[in-house]
Image (cartoon, rainbow, N blue to C red):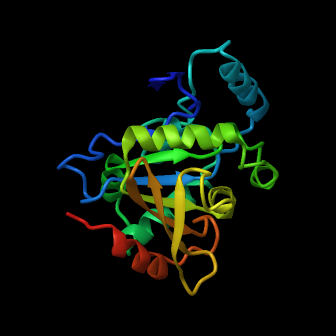
């Protein structure tokens, strides 16, 4: 990604489905799914590359996010343990409110932007991922860049770490954010995010790797997402 100001701040390039924002999308709305981070066995080397990218010594961004989606959809072979795939399935099942088929999983990813907020690898495992600071300006800048480029109308955000980063300052952190409603369950927050005079619905839910209620989350999603 290149910007009018020069080099992109985005290192982990987002997955952009081939039908995103098109008539062939399964959704009326332009949907972005925002996950918190990736962790990986070779995190140290990946983060060295990220630092070099920020310094301008490395021009090539990382397609790790795209690779993960391709592995999940069976488009790329991998030796990675597949425990994380349950997280993706749990979320997509809540979107459809049923056990989604392989075809539905493909249609879903073909219709969305999938972006990782933390632009470096968050360590080598889930425990290490909790230790990273998600409030760095470089991540905010990258997030804004992606939003301005792809112009989502709805963003579904996974997990507390990103929620805390975005709502840490309700005004001016990533634009004007107003809390429209806090639902009965603690980990479900619905906000309106205004950037460049555009209002985006921001739905913050529990991370789908943890006790992710299919029906309760589907009830929220269907308020803001319309299947064609």
Q: Residue at x 60, y 52 (%)?
A: 172
Question: Left of 94 or right of it: where is 116?
Answer: right
Q: Residue at x 32, y 67 (%)?
A: 225
Question: Left of 38 or right of it: where is 215?
Answer: left
Residue 81 to residue 163: above or below? above
Front residue of 186/182: it is: 182
Q: Residue at x 68, y 12 (%)?
A: 57
Front residue of 105/7: it is: 7
Placement of the C terminus among the 4 image quadrants: bottom left
**Residue 35, percent from left and from top:** 57, 53
Q: Is residue 70 visible?
A: no
The quadrant where residue 123 appears? top right
**Residue 164, percent from left and from top:** 68, 61
Residue 129 to residue 204: above or below? above
Residue 48 to residue 194: above or below? above
Question: Left of 123 or right of it: where is 208?
Answer: left
Front residue of 110/113: it is: 113
């Amino acid at each position: 990604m290149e910007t009018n100001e020069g080099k992109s701040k985005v290192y982990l390039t987002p997955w952009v489905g081939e039908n995103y924002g098109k008539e062939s999308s399964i959704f009326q709305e332009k949907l972005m799914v925002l996950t918190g981070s990736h962790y990986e066995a070779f995190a140290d080397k990946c983060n060295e590359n990220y630092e070099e990218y920020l310094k301008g010594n490395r021009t090539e961004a990382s397609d790790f996010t795209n690779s993960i989606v391709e592995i999940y959809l069976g488009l790329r072979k991998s030796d990675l343990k597949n425990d994380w795939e349950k997280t993706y399935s749990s979320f997509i099942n809540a979107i459809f409110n049923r056990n989604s088929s392989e075809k539905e999983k493909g249609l879903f990813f073909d219709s969305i932007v999938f972006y990782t907020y933390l632009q470096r690898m968050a360590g080598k495992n889930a425990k290490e991922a909790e230790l990273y600071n998600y409030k760095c300006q470089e991540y905010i800048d990258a997030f804004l860049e992606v939003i301005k480029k792809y112009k989502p109308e709805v963003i579904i955000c996974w997990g507390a770490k990103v929620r805390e980063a975005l709502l840490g300052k309700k005004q001016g952190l990533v634009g004007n954010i107003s809390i429209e409603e806090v639902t009965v369950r603690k980990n479900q927050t619905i906000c309106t995010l205004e950037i460049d005079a555009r209002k985006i619905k921001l739905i913050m839910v529990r991370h789908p790797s943890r006790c992710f209620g299919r029906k309760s989350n589907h009830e929220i999603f269907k308020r803001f997402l319309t299947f064609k």
